[in-house]
Image (spheres, helix red, strand yellow):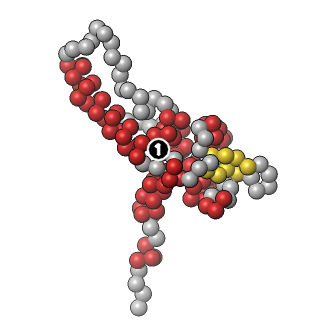
Amino acid sequence: MKISTRVEYGIIALADIAINGANGKTVSSSDISERQDISQKYLEQIIISLRQGGFVKGQKGSRGGYMLSRPAEKIYLSEILNALDNSILADAYEESEENTAGMRNSVNCCLWDKINSYMRSFTEQMTLADLIAGHKENTEDPEINMYYI
């Protein structure tokens, strides 16, 4: 399965805003662009979709930037995926009346339907907060666990 850079960068941008926008601080697109090595022009296009999807809100002015419009615990990956590319969680095939039997139908029912169902279920249960928690576990500072004598 291939995920577009639009979807990948959108999830990364939301996670960056959630991590760096704690306590109501705003996060600028230029800061996200620099930290995550994403073209700022491309990021701005993605953020427009994230705003339209109701995930972020913008603040203008000298302290302007973006913040999450709701807590990361209430933003599900399925919502993000559907806002940025509604074909990811869509059915892999459209059933035609002509081809309701045979191997193709079996493969669709036994394989693709189950994979799509699993992906929908997984993304409907995983929140942005879960993703951030996983990131923090994977990037834990090794100095924390060091003992010095």
Rendered position, 97 above or below 132 = above
Q: Which residue is mark 1?
A: 77
Inspect the image, locate mark 1, and give the three-letter code of the amino acid beneath it. Answer: Leu
Q: Percent from the top left, x then y, of residue 50?
A: 60, 40
Quadrant where the N terminus is found in the figure: top left
> Farthest left residue?
102
Question: Is the residue marked by circle 1 packed among few (<14), some (14-19), or many (20+) residues within 10 Å?
Answer: many
Where on the picture, by quarter, is residue 104? top left
Is residue 100 in sight in this rendering? yes
Q: Is residue 121 left or right of residue 55?
A: left
Residue pictured at 21% horizontal, 14% vertical: 101
Residue pictured at 41% horizontal, 91% vertical: 149
Which of 143/133 is in front? 133
> Farthest top residue?
98
Q: Percent from the top left, x then y, of residue 106?
A: 21, 22
Rendered position, 4 above or below 27 = above
Residue pictured at 30% horizontal, 29% vertical: 113
